[in-house]
Amino acid sequence: MDVFDLLMQGFQVAMQPKNLLWCLIGVTFGTAVGVLPGIGPAVAIALLLPITSKLDPSGALIMFAGIYYGAMYGGSTTSILLNTPGESATIVTAMEGNQMAKRGRAGPALCTAAVGSFIAGTIATVLLTLLAPQVVEMAIKLGPPEYFALMILAFATVSAVLGDSTLRGLVALAIGLGIGVVGIENESGQARYVMGIPQLADGIEVVTIAVGLFAVGETFYNASKLNHLSETMERVKGSILMTAEDWKRSWKPWLRGTIIGFPFGAMPAGGSEIPTFLSYATEKKLAKHPEEFGKGAIEGVAGPEAANNAASTGVMVPLLTLGLPTSATAAILLAAFQQYGLQPGPLLFETNAPLVWGLIASFYVGNVMLLILNLPLIGIWIKLLEIPKPQLYAGILVFATMGVYGMRQSAFDVFLLYVIGLMGFLMRRYGFPTAPVIVGMILGPLAESQLRRSLSISQGDPWVFLQRPISGTILAITLLIVVGPWVWRKFKMSRLTKPAI
Amino acid sequence: MRPEFPDSPPFVKGGRGDFKRGEYSQLLAREFNIEIPLNPPFSKGEAKPGSSCTMPKGQLFLSLGVVGLGIAFLIGAFMIPDAGGYSTVGPAAIPKIVGAALLLLGAFLIYEVFWLKGFRNHDEAAERALPMNWTAFAWLSGGLIVYGLTIEHIGFVPASVLLFLATAAGFNSKRWVLNAITALILASIIFALFNYGLGLNLPKGFLSGVLP
């Protein structure tokens, strides 16, 4: 069956009324958590993991994916109006978009972000549709050593390459791997680090960790650094529609941003920080009026927003075809699959084609819904930004504890949540990234079993990873991307600092 | 050598808790020749030579904590009976690697604290500019601990109301009545939605005889 037939099959799943409803709920909730500070898509999906016991997989996964890309749309609204990017990927949008808002052009800034996100999201989904079967074709030929090498690559990119410090990223990764180890081990049935606590025998729930690190840690940080906050929200004046001039200036940056962003997400080496900066720099270079950049140039919003969205859709390629999450949210989506006993990867495309293709088809549907939700209804989302901090964070904690307690009705998990929240606070305070913890915890046990399988095949010979050409190449690439940027930075740094002295 | 940013500012600003921007972003910005404007809302800190030379004690304790975690993890790993079979990866293999890694990484952190006078690319000055509010910290801690202790006895809705009140108080909100009403409505909606709509089993507490 060719791609088109498979996709049509997918649309039959995605267009079922109940799945349309789940998609709508997902993208709406996603936009809301994207707009709201203190809670992001990773937390939102984690909190809803308990309901997987009551929902069928396609409905739940369509909703979760909707939250994932819906949050990207919502995030840009907050960046533009408050100039407070929730994540570093939106830092350039925040900068340029907020400048537009300050000059009374908040409307067109929001509009170019929404339309740009739509175009980038849709084109990226087309690319995902075309690319996924190809990758699956290749992935089927991979054995355990190759998967293990890919997982090492993912660990390296998530912890070492992205972020301020390789060292602190690796600490976070090690903690995540450690958390993943707790509980009864799959193969041998051996209890690890259970310490006689029955709740630990089943392992530590990903909800507890994600919600603790992100929502509770963030709340602690904000509360304890209170009274030093001042923020101004820009008003949206006049029409939110773009003028003909705006359209003319936006469409090329949208397309260029998409082309820049998608490969970064699709390769398991991504992160959406680099493509947004790259897109911004490209637009500045190509613009007729580069002097407008930094003072509210629409290209500087259109390009990076498209790049950000295309990158986050691109993340679906390694996640769906290889089962390889390269961001915290992707890792939690993987956990959602696991709740149903499903493992994303090439096999899932064979055994569960309607589910996978239904999910991919729902991206097309969801992007259309998001365009409608974010343009005519933008006023509602702006209202969300007016919720006062005390009530907002109190509400977030009520939701957070509900999700954590509800997962398995255990008060122990609430105390664990508190401890993890304190850890999240410390990590935040001392500049440790939190995403590697989540990725390590979820991908760690999978990597362990691939390692075990690889060594069973090779009868204990650890050189198997280097002897097989594909896994050897992947490991070499891993080494290159861990060490490469460091060397490049040293080189840049020496060139940058010399003229200054 | 630590990369020196002559104008690396402590980004002190409000909003969703973004008091500082990762210096990684600055690095990227530099590499792509993007100027991130530093005038308001970013406040540019005065560079005080010498002030950064004080030993960051918190960082040292945290690094020691990582080392301690590594040791604890290693001890635990050696207590796991390891029967690897013919694959050499028994259940204790990964725990040993993780423990050793934490130990090593913790040692590197201590090295950064002592020899680089603080974590690389971490703006300690920006963090110190915002002193810790222990009252808020206590309110939130109390709220969560009380929630854990009471939820199975008084039920989801009352426990959530208490947590809401404590958190709001931590954020300096004095509108107790309004907060209590908001909390009651929010918790009741969540309870109805997740208990009856989605089949979760949240404790009913006081009302277990009354509610279906």
Image (spheres, rainbow, N blue to C red):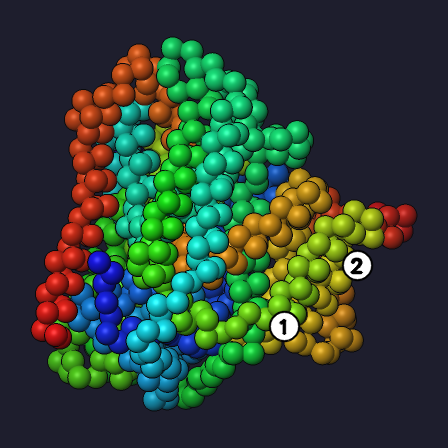
How far apart marks 2 and 1 lie (CA) works out to: 20 Å
- Quadrant for the N terminus of chain B in the image: bottom left
Task: Please tell me which residue is depicted at 32% across the width and 20% down the height of the picture.
Answer: A454
Query: Closest to the observer: A395 or B60?
Result: B60
Q: Is residue A356 visible?
A: no
Mark 2 surroundings: few (<14), some (14-19) or many (≥20) residues within 10 A: many
Name the element at disc 2.
helix
Q: Amino acid at mark 1?
A: Phe
Picture coordinates of residue A463 (x, y %)? 23, 21
Place of residue A380 in the rendered image (x, y in percent of width and height, measured from the top left) = 53, 74
* Image mark for residue B112: none
Residue carrying label 2: B158
Q: Is residue A416 visible?
A: yes
A107 or A188: nearer the eye? A188
Residue in the image at 73% along x and 72% along y: B179
From this view, report whether residue A399 is shown above or below residue A190.
below
Residue linked to disc 1? B171
Q: Amino acid at mark 2?
A: Pro
Does residue A359 lie above or below A250 as drawn?
above
Residue A44 in percent (x, y) is at 53, 54
Q: Nearer the viewer, mark 2 or mark 1?
A: 1
